[in-house]
Image: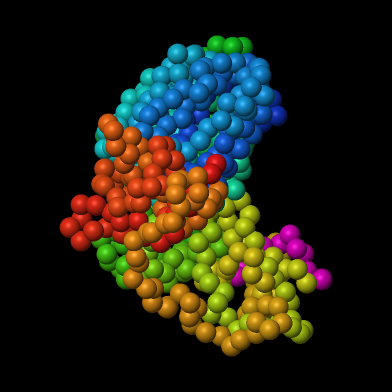
Amino acid sequence: MKASYTLSHPVLPQGAASKIDLLVTFSAEDAAAATRRSLNLSVVIDRSGSMAGAPLKHALQASRELVERMGPEDSLSIVTYDDAVATVLAPTKVTDKAAIGKVLSQVRAGGCTNLSGGWLKGVEHVSSQKSDERINRVLLLTDGQANAGVRDPGQLTNMAREKSNAGIITTTLGFGANFNEDLLIGMANAGEGHFYYIQSPEDAAGVFGIEMEGLGSLVAQNLEVVIKPAATVKVASVLNRYRFESRGQEVAVGLGDVYAAEARQLAAELSVEASSAAGPVTLATLAYRAQVVVDGSVREVVGEIPIVARLASGMDVAVSPDKNVLAQTSRLRIARVKDQAIELADKGELASAGKRLREIISEVSQYLDKASYEIAEEMEQLAHYAQRLESSKYDAVIRKELRDQSYQAGTRNRGDLALRGTAGGSADSLEAVSDAGGGIVLECVREGGKLRVHATSAGYDPGFNVQFPRSVREEGVRYVVEKLETSGDGTFYRVGGSIKRLVVPGQERVARSQDAATSARKGKPSASKVTAGSAADLPTTNSVGTGVIVQCIKEGSKLRARVVSDGYDPDLNIRFPRDIREENVLYVVDEIITMANGTSYIACGDIKRLVQ
């Protein structure tokens, strides 16, 4: 493992106090020579009713692809959970992949979400095979809230920290819009693992691939850095989301694991007192230690780096700042502001949340231009989120995108995980035309959990990203623009002039502010009525869509219906047609409403039987 550093301002003024950013990078000495360590994994899969359909299907497919990446030296266990916890594959060497695939193919959706029970069973299996020379990790998949077993987020986070201290790491993966992102991020941070937001089930395989790429290129574990500032220097702030503690003037930071496929970075802001001296000055010393595996055994490596700047006067101080460092540290400061915006929005202060996002846009724009696509995209996303908040359009998806982006920026160094999110705006506000005329045709597509716009007209590079207003990005929509300008660095395009939506003939229309269909009032829902004689006579569906999942369970001599979709209380009774009740069958109803007294539910609209 090698370590290097850069400063935002390598030359400081004599006789004046300064604030500078320090960026330290830890990476593999030789990425190609990184030795793959054997894996000891447990995959813990939420099979609660809310996972039924596409989420569970894609989670299982991603698990199969994970198995394909493993080898006979690796150990794997698989746990599923709803109300109950089941070990469907006890810890075993990955020698018969077809047999493991058969086990996965038999997993079906069930009831509520005993997240703690499933996770703890996975920890138990990893613990039984634990070795310091192996990678010992639990991958926890869920789309919902912990509504059975241990439910308290603080308790679960503390439990994850305890298991991490014992050498068992936890990575969490949240599916859809109903899981508790604060809980999963908290468990991942405390558990020294990673968190992933899988907004679309189709993204699951790509996210699993990212996790496995890292595990297959582990260079060092338990990296800890101690920043020892000089007498005239203070550590004003650690900008990453790593755990850290102050020890007098010194600051100790835990960075976790270092991968050959992903360098680990530490960013800090330093305050330097005024000095009349000239020439090189040591601002701080960085002491680090980590565990590496050499010839099959764990060894500790240690090192120190002096952080040196130069004090100068006059024109020598006018050296341009390192914009790469500023871009990296700005990304971390923006991540903090996103969390601040969430905190304000959660309290209902949406206008203040939007204002805070616009303030950071203004601050960053003073010293960073939009020469790179990443910076331009960050600014566009911030403006989009600000507009959404100011328009009182704050929902679970926006919150999860902001939290995920903040988390990934603060803990990871991968472009494919940065700025993920597909909750764009709507192209419905644009004028719709069926003839592109002399305009340039663009298309909005989903790529790795992001909405991207590319040119499809001849003469333009279809591989270039197009900097495009996020408020009108909509997956699958085509656009006509007046012109495209190539960016200053020649790596992406910017839109110029008007933007219109390209439609098929007969769908042309003028621009409008919103879709009339979305503003139409819904009629009052009515209780479900069915003419089917039994559950077998119901129409079937393999997709939940916008519906709500109900399951029938046996309690004594009675068949009781309960809501198992997240966001509902599974302990409340529900008015549900008795003739179609059948034990363990899953149903999809159009809507669930709560009785006025808040003590029970009513199933409304059509009812279908969910087949898997």
Left or right of residue 576, residue 173 in this image: right
As drawn, 429 above or below 247: below
Residue 484, image x, y percentages: 70, 75
Q: Which residue lies furthest to the front in this view?
A: 533
Q: Residue at left 52%, top 84%?
A: 512
Which span of residues is magenta-colored? 458-468
Closer to us: 445 or 497: 445
Q: Which residue is drawn at 30% across and 44% down?
A: 570
Residue 47: % across, % down: 46, 37
Q: Is residue 151 magenta?
A: no
Residue 234 visible to the viewer: no
Please say whether residue 461 is one of the residues in the magenta stretch.
yes
Q: Which residue is drawn at 67% across and 72% down?
A: 478
> Is 94 on the left or on the right of 388, as rendered?
right
In the rendered structure, the answer to whether residue 569 lies left or right of residue 208 reads left
Q: In this view, does 408 lie to the left or right of 491?
A: left
Residue 16 to residue 510: above or below: above
Query: Residue 70's x, y, as percent?
Result: 64, 25
Viewer-closest of 580 and 544? 580
View extreme (bottom): residue: 510
Quadrant of the frame with the N terminus: top right
Task: Quadrant for residue 73, please give it.
Answer: top right
Kindly identify the residue that appears in the image at 55 percent across and 41 percent down.
612
The one of 289 and 131 positioned closer to us in this rendering:
131
Say which of 592 and 608 sits in front.
Answer: 608
Q: Look at the image and tell me whether residue 519 can be seen.
A: yes
Q: Where is residue 278 in the image (x, y as percent from the top left)?
A: 45, 48
Tally the marks: 0
298 in relation to 399, above or below: above
